[in-house]
Amino acid sequence: MTLSQDLSSEVPVLDVRNLCTRFFTEAGVGKAVEDLSLCLRRGEILGLVGESGSGKTVAGFSLMGLIDPPGRVVSGQVLFEGVDLTALNERALRKLRGNRIAMIFQDPMMTLNPVLTIGTQMIETLRAHRRISRAEAWSRARDGLARVGIAAPEERLAAYPHQLSGGMRQRVAIAIALLNEPSLIIADEPTTALDVTIQAQILAEVQRLCRETGTALIWVTHDLAVVSGLADRIAVMYAGRLVEEGRTEAIIEQPLHPYTRGLIASVPSRNLRGERLRQIPGMTPSLMSLPEGCAFAPRCDRASEACRARAPVMETPASGRMVRCFHPLTAPEDRS
Amino acid sequence: MFVHILTRLFQSLVTMAAMAVLVFVGVFAIGNPVDLLINPEADQAEMAAAIARLGLDQPMWRQFLSFVSGLLQGNLGTSFVHNAPALGLILERMPATFELALLAMIFAIVIGVPAGLVAGLYPERLVGRGIMGASILGFSLPTFWVGLMLIMVFAVWLGWLPSTGRGETRSLFGIEFSFLTLDGLRHMFLPALNLAIFKVSLVTRLARAGTREVLLQDYVKFARAKGLSPARVIFVHVLKNMMIPVVTVIGLEFGSVMAFAVVTESIFAWPGMGKLLIESITRLDRPVIVAYLMLTVLLFVTINLIVDLVYSVFDPRVRLSESS
Amino acid sequence: MQRLWRQFRQSPVALISLAVLVAIIAAAVLAPLLAPQNPYDLRQIDVLDGTLPPGSQSLTGMTYLLGTDGQGRDMLSAILYGLRISIGVSATATIIALAIGMTLGMMAAYLGGRVDAVIMRLVDLQLSFPSMLIALILLALLGRGVDKVIVALVTVQWAYYARTVRGAALVERGKEYIEAAKCLRLSTPRIVFSHLMPNCLPPLIVVAMVQIAHAISLEATLSFLGVGVPVTQPSLGMLISNGFDFMMSGKYWISFFPGIALVVTVMSINLVGDRLRDLGNPRLNR
Ligand SMILES: Nc1ncnc2c1ncn2[C@@H]1O[C@H](COP(=O)(O)OP(=O)(O)OP(=O)(O)O)[C@@H](O)[C@H]1O
Ligand code: SF4
Ligand SMILES: [Mg+2]
């Protein structure tokens, strides 16, 4: 975080420090997010990548203060525009949610309330945060829909969610997130449920909107290919921990962590012709019973005794680059 | 959609027909229709005349045909006691039962929905557990005994509310109603509360289950992520969804409330169709019983039909699955 | 079974309910031994002792713990005998309904086709009317009497069992051990009775618990309305009904105590049933 402050004198939009979130279930304690640190500046797009179950959604909810029992944020800070959200009460948090920080959920089919019209769900978002008349809220909602490329927005405002397609619903969710012009949006795999063409469209639109408004964006996905064309920086998560972070080109061109390398190798388009698609061997570990040392050790071809004995800490091998590994892939020839 | 309505209509007609056959078999084939339909105090000559008049000396299939044609013309026999058409007697008392049942339903919703909501929001806390305990108690309390206790406490000991009759009524569209006068409302309060007890428990349980289910949905979390106040999340986002199953069941239960009105009406001397039924049973006024039976069958089939159709109009999922 | 009992024990409420239930059943069975007097032996009761409040002394020096009714009967004794009739009638009806419902449900599941369609239509028809109404009309046509009450209670109950058994049997039928039994060429009745039946039992027991509580309540209601058991065999409902007339003059005990007995009985069955249902529901077994 000192790095980003060096790069620009302004206070970062988001500065997460050593955030830990755990689920206290009868089956044991699940360390869903462990020692998470992130930093985002105005207008910056961060891709948060990791396979299913790596804790991306939990990380997003933790930032919003929306973790419900049996889960709890146990330690760490979330500095949003300099204010620590973990120290705020529910009332103060509520003023920020949907207003300064917005979130787009993973499943577009489930995020809109089936018995309320799109208009109601948009207008309530506006009126929860500012004193405006219904008429004004309505016209803003209409403009909001138009902005995400929805045709005939007036009609859509009167529609119920089930009358819209999945892609349309996700656009509505995005429009809702943008309504109050937040300075941070957390988008949780907003396009996974959609087909490829619509996905590309939405991606382009979101990118444009962020550039226009200066909104910082965390784009959560398990698909490295999606974010490589979108994000300024990429953070890779594995089993609840950040394992590598850096500028997108740097990560793609020269991954330092064995897991990141594995992820890149399994992206079809990046494979050389004739080369076989590589899958990372092994399974994601259960968060209830993480191994003693590095969580990736059972699947890592570089694992040593040290890896199994102790957990590696985050290192900063180069400016703007972080990796959590005892034996990072340093030289280009290490790339296989 | 149209096909669906037709199918349901047809099913209802089949049910009606089946019940008519059952009633006919019960009254004419198994029971002795002479006992059932002719005043037991009649003498020999009257008896013979009545047998001829009712066609009881005819072969079974003729009797069935005349029974059915009577049904279709709305002729369900003549009361021995009141010496008037049975159907008319029942219809006359219907508004009293209807308004009582309606008020009971309102009680059930007004008490049950908030209780279920609270129990669903705080399932682990003392309030939540307390409400669930109370609802099991409500299920276990026999309606008639609760009625007696209500009378004892509120009418006999405290003397706050009257416990018999409809009180003052006022006419609306030519029908007398109690709910239009204060005295009438006071008279309605205890019987309606009594009738509501069981349904309060039912609604509470439904509302609790619904609340817990809805709370887990993504759209509730999304509503919170939008920064809405807890009041808005609970009273708009949760409540509206949770009410769907509650309203459906309430609709279906309306018939059962009318049935249980038999008990409440005889305790509170409420002059509705239920009290008439019990009086008819004790006085062996069989035509009224048969008429009551056919009328309730009609009522039930109609309620089921209406609820089903209304449901398929409002729930898009039902509508879609029907058309595919 | 052991596991079930261990889990059942974890809920104090259910455990207490079970204890109460066992006590009530014992009291009902042993009523002639426990009751201070035989309330239907006219030599033992004295009209002069009529409507005495709880705790009064009789002329012969006996204490009426729960008071006496209009004829001078000891209420405690009357309640014990009443419980006996209430539980006896309901339990008999439940057992008969269970037998009929299970047979029909099994037939529906196993024979399928037209038999299934006919039985299930009957079930639907039956269940679309409230049991209260069916029983009332039936008794109105049949007249009062213990046997007739049992017929009415069987009529309103069988459909629930038939539906439950059919549902469970359809699930069980597809499972491997039934296939194995078929391969061994065991006869159909043999498969049904020694293999299917035991596996359909758990859901059936839960339904039966709810239904027997319901039957006790229903019987009481019918007897209260004067269409149930005859005056010579007064169940709890009849006792409550007898007290109705006295209540207006503030003599609450004649209706109140039988009512309490009824509520406690029904409630303990419901609570035990609730617990059994929760244990049978894998979603709640975290
Ligand atoms: N309510 C909960 N109770 C217990 N554990 C939970 C709960 N929610 C999440 N977890 C744990 O947190 C882990 C991370 O879940 P999360 O939903 O954040 O993964 P994800 O990276 O978003 O995966 P996906 O790509 O499938 O969405 C899960 O493996 C799960 O074990
Ligand atoms: S720390 Fe060791 S085991 Fe973990 S990723 Fe690095 S090399 Fe592999
Ligand atoms: Mg996720």
Image: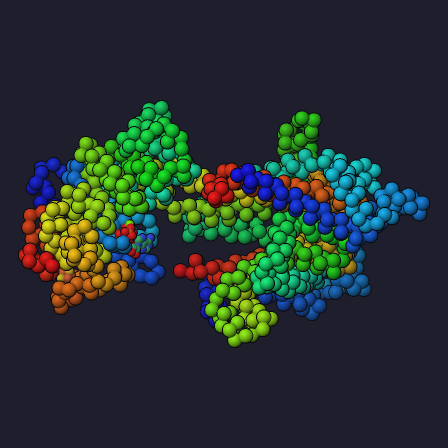
Q: Is residue A19 visible?
A: no
Q: Residue A58: where, in percent of width, then height? A: 27, 50
Q: Residue B43: where, in percent of width, then height? A: 92, 46
Q: Is residue C136 visible?
A: yes
Determine whether, in the image, residue A29 is placed left or right of residue B78: left
Q: Residue at x 42, y 41 (%)?
A: B238
Determine whether, in the image, residue A50 is placed left or right of residue B295: left
Q: Residue B303: where, in percent of width, then height? A: 61, 41
Q: Nearer the viewer, residue B71 or C51?
A: B71
Q: Residue C2: where, in percent of width, then height? A: 48, 71
Identity of the residue furthest to the right in this view:
B45
Determine whether, in the image, residue B9 is placed left or right of residue A221: right
Q: Residue at x 62, y 45 (%)?
A: B11
Q: Residue at x 36, y 24 (%)?
A: A135
Q: Nearer the viewer, residue A215 or C195?
A: C195
Classify C31 as above or below A175.
below
Identity of the residue furthest to the front in this view:
A274
Q: Nearer the viewer, residue C279 or A224?
A: A224
Q: Residue at x 64, y 48 (%)?
A: C129
Q: Quadrant of ligand 2?
A: bottom left
Q: Which of the colour schemes (rainbow, by chain, secondary structure, one colour) is used?
A: rainbow
Q: Nearer the viewer, residue A294 or A310?
A: A294
Please give the count of numbered marks on the rendered protein.
0
Residue B288 image-quadrant placement: top right
